[in-house]
Image (cartoon, helix red, strand yellow):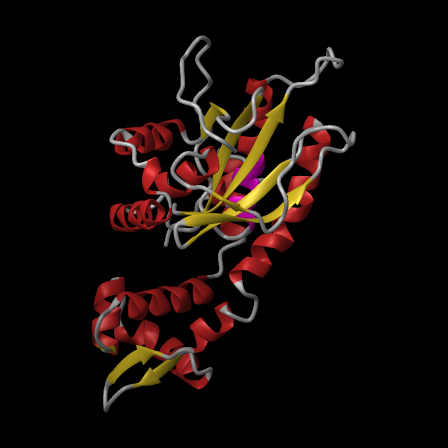
Amino acid sequence: MKDNAKDIPGMGTGPAAEAEARSYAAPALEKGLDILETLCRSEQPLTQKDIAQRLGRSVGEIYRMVACLVSRDYVTLVDENTYGVTTKLFELSHVHPPTHRLLFEATPIMQRLASELDQSCHLTVYGQGKQVVLCKVDTPSGMGFAVRAGAELDVLISASGRVLLAFQDEETRKLRIEESLQRRPEQADPQIDSTLASIRTAGYESIPSVQVRGLYAVSFPVLDAQGRAVAALTVPYAERIDQLQRKSIPEVTQALGQAARTLSSRIGGMRAPSSRPIRPGTAAPTAPA
């Protein structure tokens, strides 16, 4: 593993930053993590020699660390000389369920976003051909559009649903489209693949609603470490004719994108690249929030 100043939050680049990054290095910890990652990626148990070869190290460099991992129950001796990972990492990962972590991190981010934009926002997750509103924050001024927490929303025709489909591997995406069509066969769209490809390229979806006249939905993915959408963060943009200084849709898009990237980072996921600017005058298909 290479030390890199840009990988440390809040640290700049250049010789000074690189020197500071080196002061954060923890070679023993990195060696232990390398061993765990190597064993996790292997479909069969490995000997210490196998592990050392895959890491480009000698057996002498890793044997104490392997012994330590065995004593802490992260690694087990499968037979006389091969090692494999135990279920301890899996068990630790479930001490705090993913949904609990997502809600815990999302709530303050969504509250700040709603306050900044004076718009409501909501977080949805996919489930069996539909999406469920996990949580929502109302418009701070008290007047605006919002969905109910726990509400079930369509997938194929909504901005948030399309985001949840677009940022998946191909197999998962096809399965979810099939599940969504079983629930709403009338929403079949021969252009859905190209629509989702465009969303992946843009990094988000931004379209007028077909359910509420005058409403505009902007939705960004919340990504896991593999770049898959575990949730969609959405602002159902409602224009107020009595507010001259209302945030514009491009401003909402920028703020929402930053909020989604921050949330992705907070849950240990991948920060999506900055969104492509909205092109003035570009026509878009309509969809609900």
Does residue 40 show up magenta in the picture?
Answer: no
Q: Quadrant of the N terminus?
A: bottom left
Judge by depth and name the residue closer to the eye, 45 or 109.
109
What's the residue at 40%, 78% (across, down)? 87
- The image quadrant that residue 192 belongs to is top left
Instruction: Give percent across and percent down for residue 156.
Output: 38, 38
Identity of the residue furthest to the front in this view: 186
Nearest the viewer among 185 and 172 is 185
Residue farthest to the top, as pictured: 281
Residue farthest bottom in this picture: 80
Q: Which residues are magenta?
A: 259-266
19 or 276: nearer the viewer? 276
The reply to whether residue 99 is visible in this rendering is yes
Q: Is residue 9 visible?
A: no
Q: Residue at x 47, y 82 (%)?
A: 72
Residue 59 drawn above or below residue 96: below
The percent position of residue 59, horizontal first and vertical second, equals 27, 75
Magenta highlight: main SS: helix
Figure label count = 0
Residue 241 appears in which quarter of the rendering?
Answer: top right
Quarter assignment of residue 68: bottom left
Q: Is residue 117 left or right of residue 36?
A: right
Residue 275: where, in percent of width, then height?
Answer: 45, 27
Position of 63 with respect to 115 (left or right) is: left
Look at the picture and state if 155 lies above or below 78: above
Q: Residue at point 41% right, 12% down?
A: 282
- Image coordinates of residue 151 in percent, x first then y, are 57, 48
Compared to residue 266, the image places residue 211 above or below, namely above
